[in-house]
Amino acid sequence: FVLSNGTTQQYTNVLKLKQDLADETRSKTYLTAVPLVLDTLQRRVTATLAAAKGVKKFIANVLIAASTAYVSARRIAQGKDINYAVQPPSILKLLQAAFITVLLAPVYALANKLVLSKIRAKMGIEKGIICGGGSLANH
């Protein structure tokens, strides 16, 4: 159904992934991948950030850490955290998550503007990533 409605697909491997993501002749609305590919992408992004120097590295690391905390708290507050699929979080945990979400929302917006949007733009994926074939790591 999807292919009959004007979409295209491209196959690649981990060795050629960077080159294929950089190919601007193809639109990449979604990336469908297995966890190994996503782990590889995450390691490459982490290595690139680790190679930065000085204040730029410090600011990027602080903003990414705050963004990770924000996303984690938002998932709990919205009832979407997989860790609470069987046993829902306590009211105290929900309130804590809601407080952290409100507190870190401006920091997340800043991180999105300064760091995360650049990472997304470099990858060239317009809307999102779809993962199948195994369980994902918590990062």
Image (cartoon, rainbow, N blue to C red):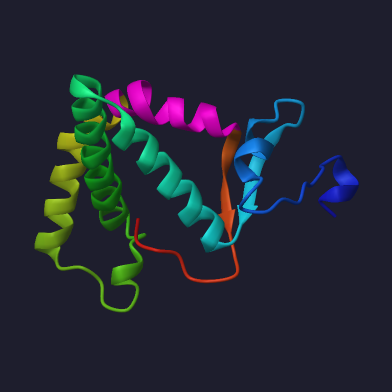
Characterize the magenta stretch by its predominant secondary structure. helix
The residue lying at 46 percent from left, 56 percent from top is 39
The residue lying at 25 percent from left, 24 percent from top is 53
Q: Nearer the viewer, residue 124 or 106?
A: 124
Locate residue 128 relative to residue 8 in the image: left or right: left
Q: Is residue 24 magenta?
A: no
Q: Is residue 119 magenta?
A: yes
* Above-or-below relation of 49 to 59: below
Q: Position of residue 40 (x, y in %)?
A: 49, 52
Locate residue 109: give its quadrant: top left
Locate residue 116 relative to residue 133 in the image: left or right: left
Locate residue 17 relative to residue 107 in the image: left or right: right
Q: Position of residue 66 (x, y in %)?
A: 21, 39
Q: Which residues are magenta?
A: 110-124
Q: Nearer the viewer, residue 109 or 53?
A: 53
* Above-or-below relation of 136 to 21: below
Locate residue 93: give its quadrant: bottom left
Q: Residue furthest left?
A: 92
Q: Position of residue 119 (x, y in %)?
A: 45, 31
Q: Position of residue 35 (x, y in %)?
A: 52, 62
The residue lying at 60 percent from left, 33 percent from top is 126
The residue lying at 18 percent from left, 58 percent from top is 94
Locate residue 134: give its quadrant: bottom right
Q: Nearer the viewer, residue 104 or 36?
A: 36
Q: Nearer the viewer, residue 3 or 84?
A: 3
Quadrant in which the N terminus appears:
bottom right
* Above-or-below relation of 139 to 86: above
